[in-house]
Amino acid sequence: MIHIAESKETARYEAAGYAVNAAYLMWSVMSHESPETAELRKRLVEEYPTIAEHCKRVYDNFDPAYREHPDSLAAAFITPQMLDTMEVVDTG
């Protein structure tokens, strides 16, 4: 998803609700124990050392009633690094 806005902060706010879905699904996959998920976790953590803990915080605060809502509790746990990794945010 690409968000173009007047400022990077506005674009990040708009993208946060969508990034929740990505973080929630990423933790859903990473939390399973298998050789494949262990390899995925290892590779992700090499690039982004705190990705697992950040995704888990989003997962733990996820409420399906607020899916894709930028003001959801889970969206509050989306970090700028997560947005830079999961979404394209620009000021055009």
Image (spheres, rainbow, N blue to C red):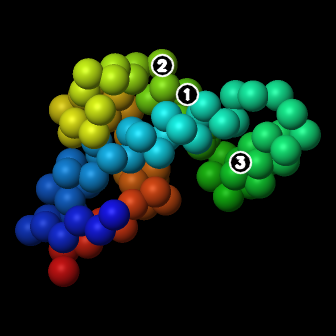
Q: Residues within 10 Å of mark 1 (few under 14, many from 20)?
A: many
Counting from the top left corner in percent of width and height, residue 53 is at 59, 31
Residue picked out by circle 1:
56
Confirm whether residue 49 shows in the render. yes
Q: Quadrant of the C terminus?
A: bottom left
Which residue is pictured at 25% across the width and 27% down the height? Answer: 66
Tag 3: amino acid = Val
Residue 63 percent coordinates (x, y): 34, 20
Residue at the image point whose x is 26% and y is 21% from the top: 65
Name the side, left or right, on which 8 lies relative to 89. left
- Furthest residue to the left? 6
Q: CA distance from mark 3 to mark 2?
A: 19 Å
Q: Secondary structure at mark 2?
A: helix
Q: Nearer the viewer, residue 41 or 80?
A: 41
Q: Residue 10, located in which quarter of the rendered image?
A: bottom left
As drawn, 10 above or below 24: below
- SS at badge 1: helix
The answer to the question of whether label 1 and label 2 lie on touching residues, with beta carbons closer than 8 A, is yes
**Taking 33 as reference, is 65 left or right?**
left
Residue placed under numbered mark 2 in the picture = 60
Identity, as a three-letter code, of the amino acid under mark 2: Asp
> Residue tagged by mark 3?
45
